[in-house]
């Protein structure tokens, strides 16, 4: 099958009350792990490329791997740009073959974020590519911010209503207490805020920074309208831990396949677990 737009997958998820996993990929082994997990679970899946992935692997390699993966499987696969930084980068990715993009204007004032998102939408719509935007600031666990600063970064439900009305964007990433990377403690999600946002905004909601969020909290967020759940850190942890285990047990190992093979298997395992938690098992 060809790569499909994220919207196709999220519309079905909305109707079925589940979420689709969006897994960050940086190399061939992770692409293969994502597909192996989706096939084993018979689940739709989103592969996404971050800014770091684009720097590391390059846009063309990412597209080539994702296309090949999609063509050789029966499960629906989307390739999504994660945290797109500019109109120019979005266009580059669309031209290269991405089926979906995120434009992250969350650092901009509301009006500028709306204007940038609209510009991206105009271009993406013309070629059948879906668009995710971000409102509120999600940030990283390494950002040293106080609780009151954190609350100030949360997505304002009324603003979300204005943003979605004026842009017509396909899905919206919200800041409700998650952060990218490894958490120091247990993240507390602002469920009343999510519920308010979802009562105003009728499009699929995206949860970033989902690694390390307790399963019950993810399940509750999905019940309240999250339809795309982003996972990167948990894949990195599983991949590197398995590589480390091989090297610790056999410090003289020189065959990369002996290191990366178990890493790929470990990544497959954690992705399968996530797919089950998100409720998208069997939904291919
Ligand atoms: O956006 C979130 C990613 O987990 C960070 O990715 O370090 O590959 O740019 P990166
Ligand atoms: P984690 O690395 O915290 O899972 O976040 C992934 C993400 O949100 C990518 O956009
Ligand atoms: Zn993110």
Image: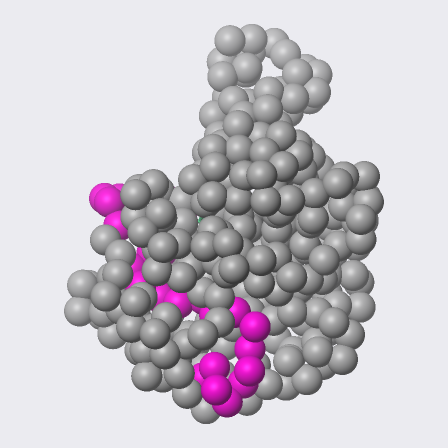
Q: Can residue 79 be seen in this view?
A: yes
Residue 85 at what x, y percent from top left?
Answer: 58, 71
Majority SS type along the magenta span: loop
Residue 232 at what x, y percent from top left?
Answer: 50, 45
Residue 143 at what x, y percent from top left?
Answer: 32, 59
Which quadrant of the structure image shows residue 93?
bottom right
Q: In this view, does 249 lie above or below 140?
A: above
157 or 185: which is nearer to us?
A: 157
Q: In this view, does 234 lie to the left or right of 33?
A: left
Q: In this view, does 11 lie above or below 53?
A: below
Q: In this view, does 191 lie to the left or right of 43?
A: left
Residue shown at the point (80%, 62%) measured from the top left: 96
Residue shown at the point (32%, 83%) measured from the top left: 158
Q: What range is drawn magenta here?
A: 163-187
Q: Can residue 26 be seen in this view?
A: no
Image quadrant containing the C terminus? top right
Residue shown at the point (52%, 69%) measured from the top left: 171
Q: Does the magenta segment cover residue 11?
A: no
Residue 190 at what x, y percent from top left?
Answer: 25, 61
The single residue placed furthest to the front in the displayed view is 15
The colour mode here is: one colour
261 or 70: which is nearer to us?
A: 70
Which quadrant of the structure image shows residue 216?
top left
Q: Does the magenta segment cover residue 179?
A: yes
Residue shown at the point (55%, 82%) measured from the top left: 168
Q: Is residue 280 above or below residue 141?
A: above
Which quadrant of the structure image shows residue 37?
top right
């Amino acid at each position: 099958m060809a790569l499909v737009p994220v919207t196709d997958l999220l519309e079905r998820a909305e109707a079925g009350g589940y979420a689709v996993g969006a897994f960050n990929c940086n190399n061939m082994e992770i692409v293969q792990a994502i597909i192996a997990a989706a096939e084993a679970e018979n689940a739709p899946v989103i592969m996404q490329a971050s800014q770091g992935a684009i720097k590391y692997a390059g846009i063309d390699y990412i597209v080539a791997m994702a296309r090949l993966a999609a063509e050789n499987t029966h499960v629906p696969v989307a390739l999504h740009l994660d945290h797109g930084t500019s109109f120019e980068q979005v266009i580059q990715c669309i031209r290269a073959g991405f089926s979906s993009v995120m434009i992250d204007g969350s650092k901009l004032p509301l009006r500028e974020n709306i204007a940038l998102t609209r510009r991206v939408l105009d271009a993406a719509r013309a070629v059948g590519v879906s668009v995710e935007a971000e409102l509120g600031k999600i940030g990283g666990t390494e950002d040293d911010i106080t609780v009151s600063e954190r609350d100030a970064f949360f997505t304002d439900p009324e603003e979300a209503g204005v943003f979605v009305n004026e842009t017509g964007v396909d899905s919206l990433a919200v800041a409700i207490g998650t952060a990218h990377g490894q958490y120091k403690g247990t993240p507390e999600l602002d469920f009343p805020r999510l519920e308010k946002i979802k009562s105003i905004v009728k499009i699929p909601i995206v949860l970033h920074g989902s690694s390390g969020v307790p399963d019950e909290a993810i399940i509750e967020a999905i019940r309240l309208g999250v339809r795309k759940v982003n996972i990167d850190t948990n894949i990195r942890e599983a991949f590197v831990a398995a590589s480390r285990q091989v090297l610790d047990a056999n410090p003289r190992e020189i065959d990369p396949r002996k290191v990366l093979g178990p890493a790929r298997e470990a990544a497959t395992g954690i992705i399968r677990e996530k797919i089950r938690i998100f409720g998208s098992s069997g939904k291919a």
